[in-house]
Image (tube, rainbow, N blue to C red):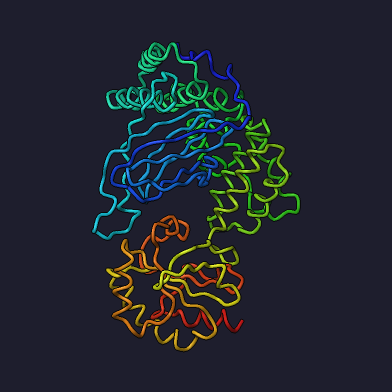
Amino acid sequence: MRGFIFALVLFFPIFGISQPVRITGTALGAEGKSVRVFVTKDFITFLEEEVAKTRIDSAGQFSLSVDITNTVSASLSIDFHRVEMFLEPGKSYKLDIAPMNYNSTIEVNPFIQSENLQVDFRNEDPEELNALIQQFSILHSNFLLKHFNDLYRDRNIALLDTFRFEIVSSFVSTHNNYFAVYVKYKMASLEQVAKAFSPAQLAKRYFSDPPVLYENAEYMNFFNQYFTKYMIATSRSLKFIDYATILKGQSSYEALMKALEADTLLKKQQLRELVMLKGLKEIYYLPGYNQENILALIKTVASQSKYPATRLIAENISKVLTYLKTGTPAPEFTLQDRNRKTVTLSSLKGKPVLLSFWTTYCQGCLSEMEAMKSLYAKYGNRMNFVSICADREFMKMLFFIDLKKDFTWTFLHIGDQLELLKEYDVKSYPLFVLIDGSGNIYSYPADFPGKGLEASIEKLLNP
């Protein structure tokens, strides 16, 4: 029984034809708010792309449409509240989102306050992927809860055979290829816990012989689990390679790919490239490695790999490693000022920008804005000062700046653009960012006005 998996795995090909997906639903309590759909671009960086957005009407109803070519991992969000789901080409989804208070008067960091949306998927399709995975997850969780010690400590492999038989019996009539692969690699994780096979046997069974399944969430979850720190620690064949020296060479891609061939599990070029990219992402922040050399190699893969999905992952890794770094474009915004007039970051190009994120309930924000007055008086004619208020209510910001008559620079309100906080990675308040006249990051995060910011402004204005 140990070698048995769903016989239908890989027998049902996924065709790359774009098909529409329709999502409708109700979200009582969220009337007037925006609902967004994000798709995971890859499972190495977990970067997301917004693919649909609409406003929930006064009756709490919404409707969205997305075109996709294959099954994708997605999330639907209202403010910072989310539900994870899978979308299959050509399918329709009807969602009932449980009522909740989206307008709590308690002001806290939305990253902390976010909750999982409680969603009922209204469908009558027994092959619907979300329902299948939910059913399997319950069985899997109950099995782990009951038998984890038996697997991890006692290595009771017979339990895996029993559980595998239960899964096959429960889904005997299922013909969803994505789900079959999902279950296969979820079972592989259990085999790893129980040490049912040696690491080399696991790699051969699940990576070396089968194709690389970039788009299956559980294949990539097991890939990440198995190959974490593989290049520098796990693989006996690779951990003594002098990567720093290889990365200095002009032909570092060819040299590193050849060096990785020392591991017999990585003979397949497609898998080897993917393991290389994961390893480069991991060593990027380790001491002793030149980050520019690593980025150059990753960009080589992004432009030269013969596998489109690998090129995409390399491109995304490059974006992640350089995000909000000096010289990269600052995320755009379109927000309203105190007079309800629209202000965009792009409209401020030509002069540098001192951007800050703050709230009226943040004591540190208020003291730093007091310190910012002198900077505005000194540099306000040479650069733009913009403070974005993250309070829920526009009137709170307006009431505050009406009291502070000497705060005369530009104040904007976040409104329903809460994703901007994510784009600027705002984890605490205040946050200051210096942006040059071309709209690129100069300093992130910048020093506080009361703790060295003026020196950075001088360097920016007088290079």
> Could you tell me residue 450's position as x and y percent?
38, 81
Question: In the image, is residue 14 above or below residue 62?
Answer: above
- Please give left or right for residue 349 compared with residue 245 in the image: left
- Please give left or right for residue 408 compared with residue 435 in the image: left
Residue projecting furthest to the right: 250
Could you say which quadrant of the image residue 162 lies in? top left
**From this viewpoint, is residue 98 visible?**
yes
* Quarter of the image where the C terminus is located: bottom right
Could you say which quadrant of the image residue 173 lies in? top left
Query: At 54% across and 25% down in the image, what residue appears?
Result: 206
Query: At 59% across and 57% down in the image, what residue appears?
Result: 289
Residue projecting furthest to the front: 58
> Could you tell me residue 276's position as x and y percent?
62, 42
**From this viewpoint, is residue 158 visible?**
no
Residue projecting furthest to the bottom: 378
Question: In the image, is residue 37 above or below residue 376?
Answer: above
Question: In the image, is residue 450 above or below residue 20?
Answer: below
Count the marks: 0
Could you say which quadrant of the image residue 325 lies in? bottom right
Between 267 and 12, the residue placed more toward the observer is 12
> Could you tell me residue 219's position as x and y percent?
51, 30
Between 22 and 134, the residue placed more toward the observer is 22
> Could you tell me residue 228's position as x and y percent?
50, 40
* Quarter of the image where the N terminus is located: top left
Between 157 and 111, the residue placed more toward the observer is 111
